[in-house]
Amino acid sequence: MKKILLIVNGLIAQEFLKRISNDFLNTNEYSVVYFEDDILPERKVEHFKYFKFDPTSYAKLSSLLKKENFFQVLIILSNKTDVEEVIKNVKMVRKDIAISIMDRWNLKLEEKNISMKNIQRININDVITNRLVHTLPNVPVIAQNIGLGKGEIMEVSVPFTSSYVYRHISSIEQKNWKIAGVYRNSQFIVAKDSFMIQPNDILLMVGAASVLKQVYRAIKRDIGQFPAPFGSNIYVLIDMRFDNTKSIKSSLNSAKYLHSKLKNKKVIVKILNPNSLKLLEFIKSYDESFTVCINYFAKTLSEQIYLDSKSYNIGLIIVSSRVFRNRRFKTTLYLSGFPVLKVGKKDIEDVKDAIVILSKNENLERTSSIMFDISSQLNLNMKLLDFDPEGEFKEKTVEFFQNISRIFSKNIDTISVNANPIREAKKIENFLHFVPFTEDIIDSNIFSIFSGNVEKLYYKLDDYNQLFIPVLI
């Protein structure tokens, strides 16, 4: 049991004494120095001793400090000068003792030649401001009195329209942060991988403060905003070493259509390796609202995309299938972290359906909010092709898609396929194929036909428009 010296007066001190006398009876032994009797709690408890004198008197305070071996001194006084004098008195007797003070004046103790060593200041102005800020909507609640108090412990309520709703915790990549628990219906639930987040849940998160700020924005992001959160503009990448007239026209037509439907701001057309003046003139005259940039100088593709991502705030990259077949291009696009639309032979403006082929990984949950966001903006019917109709994983994934479809007010058709899902997909006349953009896409080749991994078989649907979505947090 530790001995604590409390030097107190005022209304805050009165409430403080009342609280600790009721809630913390047997944890510490308290000696209370006070001015006025009305500050004392009505309930007298065993582990409290009371001393009525002026603590600015060095003779009286030093006598008590020398008599008892105190572990800590807590000062709650309503007068600035009294606080400074009491600290001086304590330091003269016990210069290394831990001192906590209530500070409502932003004290500059160093200017009074008082060492700040072992002094903890509780700034009342900060505490009140933080509490008031936390009453505002869409503001994260940050633990002030635990850890560093800089935001490494945070509570965030999950709105109904969040991309985190109906996701299993295991599907959320938690790098440098973690969901520690969930508050639901006034109960605390320890977070488990199988736990599904529901609207109005409050997530208790721990991690690096800078990371949690990004996670907070991701949780609160409204749906129907694609290409956000990646960026705000569509970026059409044309390489004249691979692209011909037909593929260039298809890419530009797709960009124009998506520009009319999505929440993007501009279309930027980047031309690499120009070799045809006629094609350049066609591209420049295609749409006056497009920004056309020609790269006459040799830069690596990765360097070019990196520089353009900073200049143009890229949210979606559009390429032809001729470009996407190149492994070097495909690898660079994967590493860029942007969604990539590979334009197929079928016109995207005629698309009525979006398909997802169920695969046994959790990347589908991680990318699902983007899938539904785009489907909603393009008014597409969602179809889930399930070629493995057995198992708990399938049931969990189908349930997830059905739940999240409610957020977007879109029906989703689940089609069980016992045969080849690629063959089944080709029965649909035209569609947009959603694919999680993983390393399996890069590794895909002609020998992938023997693989059971449907993502590696994406090239079998090369005639169709395919949107490769990077795995999100």
Image (spheres, rainbow, N blue to C red):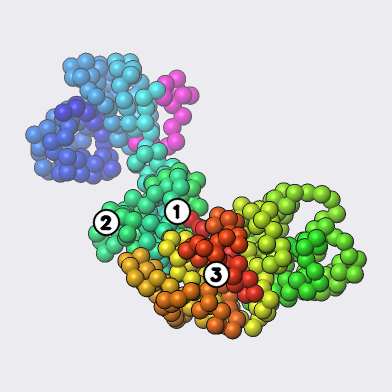
Magenta part of the protein: which range?
Answer: 102-116
| Residue 380 seen anywhere in this rendered image of the structure | no
Instruction: Indicate which disc, 2 or 1, sits on the residue closer to the N terminus.
Output: 1
Q: Nearer the viewer, mark 2 or mark 1?
A: 1
Residue 159 x/y as whole percent: 41, 66
CB atoms of marks 2 and 3 within 8 Å: no
Counting residues from the N terminus, which is met first, the one under dot 2 or under dot 3?
2
Q: Which residue is mark 3?
A: 434
Give the percent coordinates (x, y) of residue 432: 58, 75
**Residue at the image position 52 percent from the left and 63 percent from the top:** 450
Q: Main secondary structure of the magenta part?
A: loop
Q: Label 2 to label 1, Cα distance in Å?
A: 20 Å
Q: CA distance from mark 3 to mark 1?
A: 20 Å
Q: Quadrant of the N terminus?
A: top left
Is residue 23 at least partly visible in the picture?
yes
Q: Secondary structure at mark 1?
A: loop
Within the magenta stretch, is there residue 105? Answer: yes
- Residue occupying image coordinates x 19% and y 27%: 2
Task: Tell me which residue sits at (32%, 27%) in the image.
Answer: 99
Residue at 35% x, 29% y is 83
Q: How many marks?
A: 3
- Is residue 138 shown left or right of residue 245? left
Image location (x, y in percent) of residue 439: 55, 55
Residue behind mark 2: 189
Q: Amino acid at mark 1?
A: Glu
Task: From the viewer's side, name the closer residue of 335 and 216.
Answer: 335
Tag 2 secondary structure: strand
> Taking 122 as reference, is 240 above or below it?
below
Q: What residue did someone put label 1 on?
A: 173
